Amino acid sequence: MASIINSHIFKDIFGTAAMRHLWSDKARTAYYLKWEVALAKVQAKLKIIPQEACDEIIAKAKVENIDFDKLKQKTELIGYPVLGVVQQIGSICRDGLGEWCHWGATTQDVTDSATVMAIRDSLSIIETDLDHIMNSVAKLAEDHRLTPMAGRSNLQQAVPISFGFKMARLLATFQRHKERIGEIRKRVLTLEFGGAAGTLATLDSNVALKCQAELARELQLTQPEIAWHTERDRIAEVGAFLGILCGTLSKNATDIKLMMQTEIGEVSEPYVPHRGSSSTMPNKVNPISCVYIHALAATVRQHAAALMDAMVEDHERSTGPWEIEWIVLPEAFILTAGALNQSKSLMAGLQVHPKNMRRNLNLTKGLIVSEAVMMGLGAKIGRQTAHDLVYEYCRRAVLEDRMLIELLKEDKTISEVLSNSELEYLCNPTNYLGLSGIMVDNILNAYKTTIRTRDTGA
């Protein structure tokens, strides 16, 4: 096993076949050839190269015509694969017409544009996976709109929330990620074509920018406002997005891991016989998808940091930082696909245990509603006074192992301003969910509106 993403055993745990294909040697070479064919078409149209040369380049610039063993040798010799590809295509074109291939271009023009096209196709895969995950999360939010559970702060029970509220927050975050993908497409899906130092000096000044514009249109990319050979903010932004997206997936996985603990038992990963089993403890059903997501996300964040380092490039063409992208960007996309794939199955089959959620709400003998009591009492005797009084009874409830409401009912100061029925209302966790339900509705309505807009094309 040279790498986890190519391991026969692990590759479909930590990645997906679809994303691996997009970043394979064959696919990358296909992007190179697509670029060269597009350039030939545009340049023939603008009479920069002969139409006959264009036709021959189009006929021969096919992946099946590439000898990958020979390309490997040439890449090791030259240092870059593009020239080896161009040489192979040129050698099989008749009558020397292949000499017109790659006219006026430089290696990085092709390489960067190929990377951008791979990013474009990769974002489509990510967006599709996100749609699947969001559909599952939306259903959980709707089904558990008012399912009460303990909200937690600093790993301690805080106040009641609904499980639907927890899922709605996740759904809203994914919605922001969908918006980020749209914004990234506007900035990142940009052609690279400037020649040696980006000035297009190799082409006649009367047609150079026209050629660039037509090439961008042919490849369905944006024309660059100026060369970006060593301005790598576009690639770094993609890396940052992958890191942020995986951070969200890992935050969700972390919550689920914690909620799966034996003593908590509020949710479980989808049940599959023997998944998560122990080699020695028959009772164990360990979190598996959550564990993988955590590891994948942590690694992608490190790759995102490496892409930030790759921004520090020297002058107009760099000496080393650019190659950092070759190493980490493919793996970052493949690992992100793995995290999404694990999240997709996790959220589609997540088992929710409302009874255990309710049990845990009662675990502290009423302390989880202390804020509700304080606010109800504060309106009668003052907030700070109420806080100090309830604080003391919370301590006593723990020390004396008694229900908070019992102690509250015994206090004369409290009984003078709040009836027993009012105290019982305040001490019922289901009455202190705040606007959980309304907030869930708001997020679901926004999500459904987005779906309708997408489906109708409006």
Image: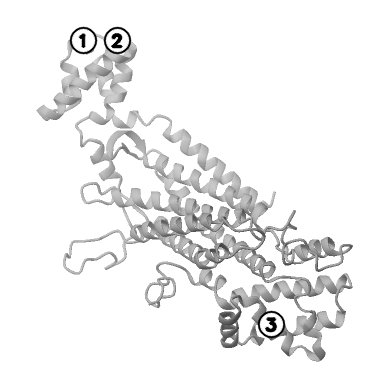
Q: Nearer the viewer, mark 3 or mark 1?
A: 3
* Disc 2 packing (10 Å; few <14; some 14–19; many ≥20): some
306 relative to 99, above or below = above
Left or right of 306? Residue 185 is right
| Residue that numbered label 3 is attached to | 62
Q: Which mark is residue 413?
A: 1
Q: Residues within 10 Å of mark 3 (few under 14, many from 20)?
A: some
Q: Are marks 1 and 2 in contact (CB under 8 Å)?
A: yes
Alpha carbon separation for disc pair 1 and 2: 9 Å
**Which label was assigned to residue 381?**
2
Q: Position of residue 188 (x, y in %)?
A: 64, 56
Gap between marks 3 and 2, in whole Å?
82 Å
**From this viewpoint, is residue 267 visible?**
no
| Outermost left residue | 400
In this view, the residue in front, 393 or 439, is: 393
For the residues marked 3 and 1, what is the alpha-carbon distance in whole angstroms? Answer: 87 Å
The answer to which of 179 and 324 lies nearer the viewer is 324
Please state if 10 lies on the left or on the right of 244 as rendered.
Answer: left
- Could you say whether the residue bearing mark 2 is in a helix, strand or loop? helix
Would you place residue 43 above or below residue 346 in this image? below
Q: Callout 3: helix, strand or loop?
A: loop
Residue type pointed to by label 1: Thr
Task: Say few, some or many: other residues with alpha carbon within 10 Å of mark 1 (under 14 / 14 to 19 / 20 or more).
Answer: few
Task: Return the x and y of residue 280 as percentages of the image width and height.
Answer: 16, 68
Counting from the top left corner in percent of width and height, residue 255 is at 34, 48
Residue drawn at the location 25% of the way across and 45% of the way down: 356
Give residue 41's quadrant in the image.
bottom right
| Of the image marks 3 and 2, the number of the one nearer the N terminus | 3
